[in-house]
Image (cartoon, rainbow, N blue to C red):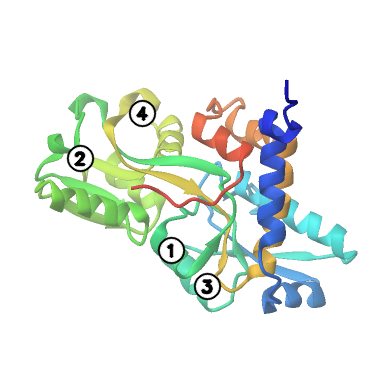
Amino acid sequence: MQKKHPSRSNPMLLAVASASAMLISQPSVADATLDRILSSGQINLGHFPGEEPFSDVDAQKQPIGYSIDLCKRVVEDLSKSSGKPIQINWVDVVDAKNRFTLMDGKKIDALCADTTNNRERQKKYSFSYTMYVAGIRLLSDKSKSYKSFSDLRGKKVGVIAGTTGEGLLKGVSNDKQLGYQVVMSKDLESLWELLEKKQVEAIAYDDILLANKAAKSKAGGNAYTFLHEYLSVEPYGIMTRKDDVDFMKTINKTLANLFITGEIMTYYNKWFMNGSRKIPLGHILSEDFKAPNNYPAYP
């Protein structure tokens, strides 16, 4: 009987080989961002306060969160490999639209938040390997008993301007001729106020973030419920400029090592399996950790 090659019989070895090949095969293109980071010993990282558990600030106004920790690890690894100390300059991106302005204006080198990797954004920006997978859904008052998109026909629905949810919500409304009255907000706090003050019937955003807000709301998590349908499945990644090839290779090297060794679960459990929330690792994200990739959102 012919002996099987080890790499063909061990999924973990296949994943390691795949991730390593992706990193090695990327073209060696010197990018100004990584050169500047190494020569100046400083890096500008964007964060998005109020997006717990991905990006927020503590009582001392210091950035905290799952994405923040992963970005810190990237910088730590880069500092070790280069033999140079690197100082992090945190930049508050303020709102969803401003993050792209800051990135385009080179005010930030990477965005450490809950940024969706989709096809449209990939035309202009680069995204790291997927570090979390969420779903964009509609949340409403449980007493209203809304279950499907059609239940909200002609009603007011809130969404954050400049997010992927905005286009998806408008698309569903138009495609299904539902006539939603779309109400814009600038961030998650103002979006939540629309629902809490009953100025809209439902709000559309990433399910993990809405569930977190509901759990900490005055009424409590049981007062709200998600509609059964999804607007999309959203992979999150660390975002950089498209031409920062070397810098993205550095980011992905750190993430791939965390994923393949399983160390990523230390970070995951810290933010998603703790006293305030219990969100077990989902099937899609589990597969992403086994075979690192930056596939965009669908549909």
**Who comes first in sequence, dot 4 or dot 3?**
3
**Who comes first in sequence, dot 2 or dot 1?**
1
Identify whether 46 is placed above or below 158.
Answer: below
Residue 127 on image: x %, y %: 55, 58
Q: Which residue is mark 4?
A: 219
Please tell me which residue is depicted at 55% across the width and 70% down the height of the picture.
242
Q: Which mark is residue 121?
A: 1
> In 3D space, how far apart are the residues under numbered discs 4 and 3 (Cα atoms)?
36 Å
Which secondary structure, mark 4? loop
Which secondary structure, mark 3? helix
Q: Nearer the viewer, mark 2 or mark 4?
A: 2
Which secondary structure, mark 1? helix
Within 10 Å of the Cα at label 2, are there few (<14), some (14-19), or many (20+) other Cα atoms?
some
Residue 61 on image: x %, y %: 64, 54
> In 3D space, how far apart are the residues under numbered discs 2 and 1 (Cα atoms)?
29 Å
**Who comes first in sequence, dot 1 or dot 4?**
1
- The amino acid at mark 1 is Arg
Residue 15 image-quadrant placement: top right
> In 3D space, how far apart are the residues under numbered discs 2 and 3 (Cα atoms)?
33 Å
Q: Which residue is mark 2?
A: 201
- Look at the numbered discs 2 and 4 and tell me whether their residues touch, using CB distance below 8 Å: no
Residue 111 versus residue 244: which sits nearer the camera? 244
Within 10 Å of the Cα at label 1, are there few (<14), some (14-19), or many (20+) other Cα atoms?
some
**Who comes first in sequence, dot 1 or dot 3?**
3
251 lies left or right of 177: right
Identify whether 277 is placed above or below 162.
Answer: above
- The amino acid at mark 4 is Ala
Within 10 Å of the Cα at label 4, are there few (<14), some (14-19), or many (20+) other Cα atoms?
few
Q: Which residue is mark 3?
A: 102
Residue 285 versus residue 20: which sits nearer the camera? 20
- Look at the numbered discs 4 and 3 and tell me whether their residues touch, using CB distance below 8 Å: no
> In 3D space, how far apart are the residues under numbered discs 1 and 4 (Cα atoms)?
36 Å
